[in-house]
Image (tube, rainbow, N blue to C red):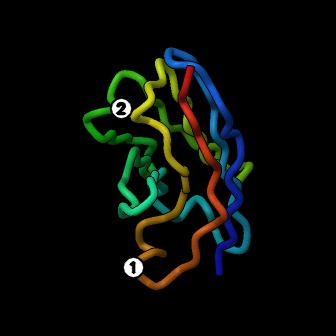
Amino acid sequence: QVQLVESGGGLVQPGGSLRLSCTASGSIFSNYIMAWYRQTPGNQREVVALIGRDYKTHYEDSVKGRFTINRDDAKNTVYLQMNSLQPEDTAKYYCNAPVLIMKGGDWGQGTQVTVSS
Protein backbone atom coordinates (compact mmCIF):
# COMPACT_ATOMS: atom_id res chain seq x y z
CA GLN A 1 0.00 0.00 0.00
CA VAL A 2 1.38 3.40 -1.04
CA GLN A 3 0.40 6.60 0.68
CA LEU A 4 0.83 9.80 -1.32
CA VAL A 5 0.93 13.36 -0.02
CA GLU A 6 0.92 16.23 -2.50
CA SER A 7 1.83 19.80 -1.58
CA GLY A 8 2.94 23.11 -3.04
CA GLY A 9 -0.22 24.32 -4.71
CA GLY A 10 -1.69 27.77 -4.33
CA LEU A 11 -2.94 30.88 -6.05
CA VAL A 12 -0.63 32.40 -8.62
CA GLN A 13 -0.95 35.06 -11.29
CA PRO A 14 -0.68 34.18 -14.98
CA GLY A 15 2.96 33.82 -15.92
CA GLY A 16 3.92 32.76 -12.42
CA SER A 17 5.53 29.59 -11.15
CA LEU A 18 4.86 26.89 -8.59
CA ARG A 19 6.72 23.78 -7.53
CA LEU A 20 4.63 20.82 -6.48
CA SER A 21 5.96 17.99 -4.36
CA CYS A 22 4.62 14.50 -3.79
CA THR A 23 6.03 12.25 -1.13
CA ALA A 24 5.26 8.54 -1.16
CA SER A 25 5.49 6.08 1.67
CA GLY A 26 4.65 2.45 2.18
CA SER A 27 6.31 0.95 -0.87
CA ILE A 28 9.54 0.97 -2.81
CA PHE A 29 9.17 4.27 -4.61
CA SER A 30 12.08 3.75 -6.97
CA ASN A 31 10.37 0.70 -8.53
CA TYR A 32 7.68 2.78 -10.17
CA ILE A 33 7.12 5.06 -13.08
CA MET A 34 5.58 8.14 -11.47
CA ALA A 35 3.17 10.65 -12.94
CA TRP A 36 1.50 13.93 -12.19
CA TYR A 37 -2.17 14.22 -13.05
CA ARG A 38 -4.65 17.06 -12.90
CA GLN A 39 -8.39 17.23 -12.66
CA THR A 40 -10.96 19.98 -13.04
CA PRO A 41 -14.53 19.73 -11.77
CA GLY A 42 -16.66 17.44 -13.89
CA ASN A 43 -13.71 16.04 -15.82
CA GLN A 44 -11.52 12.98 -15.55
CA ARG A 45 -7.97 13.14 -14.31
CA GLU A 46 -5.48 13.61 -17.12
CA VAL A 47 -1.79 12.82 -17.17
CA VAL A 48 0.36 15.93 -17.21
CA ALA A 49 3.83 14.43 -16.95
CA LEU A 50 5.54 11.07 -16.46
CA ILE A 51 8.99 10.12 -15.25
CA GLY A 52 10.45 6.66 -15.59
CA ARG A 53 12.78 4.77 -13.30
CA ASP A 54 15.51 5.80 -15.76
CA TYR A 55 14.47 9.46 -15.36
CA LYS A 56 13.15 9.65 -18.91
CA THR A 57 10.25 12.07 -19.06
CA HIS A 58 7.09 12.58 -21.09
CA TYR A 59 4.79 15.58 -21.11
CA GLU A 60 1.27 16.34 -22.24
CA ASP A 61 1.46 18.70 -25.21
CA SER A 62 -0.03 21.73 -23.47
CA VAL A 63 2.65 21.78 -20.76
CA LYS A 64 5.74 20.96 -22.85
CA GLY A 65 8.42 23.56 -22.33
CA ARG A 66 6.68 24.95 -19.24
CA PHE A 67 6.53 22.06 -16.77
CA THR A 68 9.38 19.85 -15.57
CA ILE A 69 8.95 16.60 -13.69
CA ASN A 70 11.74 15.23 -11.54
CA ARG A 71 12.20 12.63 -8.85
CA ASP A 72 14.42 12.03 -5.84
CA ASP A 73 14.25 8.34 -5.04
CA ALA A 74 16.28 8.79 -1.87
CA LYS A 75 13.51 11.05 -0.56
CA ASN A 76 10.63 9.09 -2.13
CA THR A 77 9.55 12.36 -3.70
CA VAL A 78 8.49 13.47 -7.17
CA TYR A 79 8.35 17.12 -8.14
CA LEU A 80 6.57 19.19 -10.76
CA GLN A 81 8.10 22.57 -11.53
CA MET A 82 5.46 24.65 -13.29
CA ASN A 83 6.49 27.84 -15.06
CA SER A 84 4.57 30.30 -17.24
CA LEU A 85 1.34 29.19 -15.63
CA GLN A 86 -1.88 30.02 -17.43
CA PRO A 87 -5.50 30.08 -16.25
CA GLU A 88 -6.14 26.81 -18.09
CA ASP A 89 -3.62 25.14 -15.76
CA THR A 90 -6.05 25.68 -12.89
CA ALA A 91 -6.87 22.25 -11.48
CA LYS A 92 -6.27 19.94 -8.58
CA TYR A 93 -2.98 18.14 -9.11
CA TYR A 94 -2.25 14.60 -8.00
CA CYS A 95 0.69 12.26 -8.27
CA ASN A 96 0.59 8.50 -8.55
CA ALA A 97 2.19 5.49 -10.12
CA PRO A 98 0.20 4.36 -13.16
CA VAL A 99 0.76 0.69 -12.39
CA LEU A 100 -0.64 1.15 -8.88
CA ILE A 101 -3.73 2.90 -10.26
CA MET A 102 -4.37 -0.12 -12.50
CA LYS A 103 -4.16 -2.30 -9.41
CA GLY A 104 -6.76 -0.18 -7.64
CA GLY A 105 -4.41 1.94 -5.58
CA ASP A 106 -5.59 4.97 -3.64
CA TRP A 107 -5.14 8.61 -4.57
CA GLY A 108 -3.79 11.27 -2.27
CA GLN A 109 -5.72 14.40 -1.39
CA GLY A 110 -4.16 16.38 -4.23
CA THR A 111 -3.06 19.99 -4.19
CA GLN A 112 -5.06 22.84 -5.71
CA VAL A 113 -3.44 25.13 -8.25
CA THR A 114 -5.34 28.26 -9.18
CA VAL A 115 -4.00 30.62 -11.83
CA SER A 116 -5.83 33.91 -11.81
CA SER A 117 -5.17 37.63 -11.86
| Residue drawn at x 41%, y 23% as measured from the top left | 66
Q: Is residue 57 above or below residue 65?
A: below
Whether tag 1 and tag 2 are in contact, CB under 8 A, the answer is no
Mark 1 burial class by Cα count in 10 Å: few <14, some 14-19, many 20+: few
Mark 2 burial class by Cα count in 10 Å: few <14, some 14-19, many 20+: some
Question: From this viewpoint, which residue is outermost toward the top?
Answer: 15
- Left or right of 62 on screen, residue 116: right
Q: Is residue 59 above or below residue 14?
A: below
The residue type indicated by label 2 comes to Val
**Which is in the foreground here, disc 1 or disc 2?**
2
Q: Mark 2 points at which residue?
A: 63
Q: In this view, does 100 lie above or below 35?
A: below
| Residue drawn at x 47%, y 31% as measured from the top left | 68
The residue type indicated by label 1 comes to Met
First along the sequence among labels 1 and 2? 2
Q: Position of residue 86 (x, y in %)?
A: 44, 25
Pick the quarter of the image with the C terminus.
top right
Question: From this viewpoint, which residue is outermost toward the front?
Answer: 117
Q: Where is residue 2 in the image (x, y as percent from the top left)?
A: 65, 74
Q: Position of residue 26 (x, y in %)?
A: 72, 74
Q: Name the residue under label 1.
A: 102
User: How far is the residue under mark 1 from the one under mark 2?
Assistant: 24 Å
| Residue drawn at x 50%, y 15% as measured from the top left | 15
Question: From this viewpoint, which residue is outermost toward the left?
Answer: 61
Mark 1 element type? helix
| Residue drawn at x 63%, y 32% as measured from the top left | 19
The answer to which image quadrant residue 79 occupies is top right
Q: Position of residue 74 (x, y in %)?
A: 71, 49
